[in-house]
Image: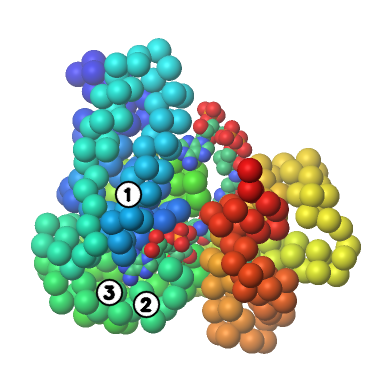
Amino acid sequence: MASVCKTFSRGFSSSAIRQTTIKHLTVIGGGLMGSGIAQVAASTGHQVSMVDQSDDILNKSKANIGKSLQRVVKKKFADDPKGGEQFLSETMGRIETSTSAVACMEKTDLVIEAIVENLEIKQKLFSELDAAAPKHTIFTSNTSSIPIGDIASSTKRLDRFGGLHFFNPVPVMKLLEVIRIPATSDETFNKLLAFGKDMQKATVNCKDTPGFIVNRLLVPYMIEAVRMLERGDASPRDIDTAMKLGAGYPMGPFELSDYVGLDTMKFILDGWSKNYPENPLFRPSPMLDKLVGEGKLGAKSGEGFYSYKK
Ligand SMILES: CCCCCCC[C@H](O)CC(=O)SCCNC(=O)CCNC(=O)[C@H](O)C(C)(C)COP(=O)([O-])OP(=O)([O-])OC[C@H]1O[C@@H](n2cnc3c(N)ncnc32)[C@H](O)[C@@H]1OP(=O)([O-])[O-]
Ligand SMILES: NC(=O)c1ccc[n+]([C@@H]2O[C@H](COP(=O)([O-])OP(=O)(O)OC[C@H]3O[C@@H](n4cnc5c(N)ncnc54)[C@H](O)[C@@H]3O)[C@@H](O)[C@H]2O)c1
């Protein structure tokens, strides 16, 4: 009992009483978000299959998870190196990788999709999975901006479909937005909320409205900062300093844009400007388009609004 409490107090409840019947999950996409979700799911005792398009990408994802876990271990197991080693190896041991999402379906209770922010690609993936997954399997998307209902419409399991929107970096950010579409059953929604608790996140209930809660407020703020730069009103460094020291944000809007990925920002803005052309807040940004066109995607590509080249 003592060891259960000790484990729990560190914030890792793999041996504590679990809220849900979700034992195995499949995370599709091993990028920024998918690798973070897989890490947290495994560190809270779930068996995880992480899927991406190639073994090369998956090897990088696993290496990133290893590095992130080292940071967690350094902090949480500062006085217990043996416990830290055990936690690290047990967590990594719960993650298997695959290049076939369909092949993982048979054993999975929950799918969390975290692939590129593109409706057609997400729909194609889910329609293939729908045919392969057991009846009880719940499908979710981690989309930042696409209506969950539009993604779900490619399947015949609307009652077992919802949204799980995590925040970057997943191992650090405490929030999980849990989204329901009108057809999501109460049973499914309650299972998703309980799963969020098992993942040791604070959950908020969201309707399937554009940007849910956080991004409906965050996207206009971030893109307004880019428009301020386009007008030549202030430099990225000064805008970032102003928002950090004047508004208490941990990162300024340009640091955060580079951290999130400028391609993801562009996918969001393009989708919203197409769907809501009357809203001036969502109109495209020439500067963002140019940077993405030049392959400057932020920290992950070595350059965005700032340079990360050593
Ligand atoms: C068009 C607009 C588009 C909008 C896009 C929306 C995107 C999306 O849908 C929503 C989002 O996610 S929105 C984005 C939402 N996200 C935000 O808004 C993020 C805002 N930024 C922040 O909150 C902070 O800058 C960070 C937490 C990122 C870094 O913190 P810092 O103080 O600057 O730097 P530090 O000292 O290095 O790290 C501090 C502690 O964190 C730990 N750690 C860090 N990374 C880790 C990892 N990967 N693994 C494990 N651990 C990690 C680290 O070990 C350390 O622990 P310690 O015990 O204290 O030594
Ligand atoms: N970046 C963020 O801060 C953030 C935060 C919350 C939500 N999201 C959302 O999460 C999702 C993923 O974003 P990301 O930042 O992790 O992107 P990313 O580009 O870092 O990773 C996406 C991964 O998906 C893989 N992929 C693409 N198509 C695939 C397919 N058909 N099958 C398997 N794998 C495939 C890619 O190879 C890549 O590794 C997007 O929907 C995004 O809007 C992003």
Disc 3 from disc 1: Cα separation: 24 Å
Q: In the depicted view, which residue is nearer to us: 194 or 301?
A: 301
Q: Nearer the viewer, mark 3 or mark 1?
A: 1
Q: What residue would you read off at disc 3? A: 126
Quarter of the rendered image showing ligand 2: bottom left
Can residue 165 be seen by looking at this rendering? no
What is the three-letter code of the residue carrying label 2?
Ile
* Picture quadrant of residue 148: bottom left
Q: Is residue 214 above or below residue 121?
A: above
Q: Report if the beta carbon of the residue with label 2 is closer than 8 angstroms to ligand 2.
A: yes
Expressed as whole percent of the image width and height from the top left, the position of residue 261 reads 56, 60
* Residue depicted at 64% across the width and 48% down the height: 308
Q: Is residue 27 above or below residue 74?
A: below
Q: Is residue 227 above or below residue 310?
A: below
Q: Is residue 32 left or right of residue 19?
A: right
The disc at residue 290 is: none
For label 1, count other residues whose C-alpha is less than 10 Å away and answer few (under 14), some (14-19) or many (20+).
Answer: some
Label whose residue precedes the other's in the sequence (2 or 3): 2
For label 3, count other residues whose C-alpha is less than 10 Å away and answer few (under 14), some (14-19) or many (20+).
Answer: many
Label whose residue precedes the other's in the sequence (1 or 2): 1
What is the three-letter code of the residue carrying label 3?
Phe
Q: Secondary structure at mark 3?
A: helix
Q: Nearer the viewer, mark 2 or mark 3?
A: 2
Q: What residue would you read off at disc 1? A: 59
Give the position of the N terminus as an image quadrant: top left
Q: What residue would you read off at disc 2? A: 121
* Residue depicted at 33% across the width and 22% down the height: 84
Give the position of the C terminus as an image quadrant: top right
* Picture quadrant of residue 181: bottom left
Expressed as whole percent of the image width and height from the top left, the position of residue 173 reads 49, 44
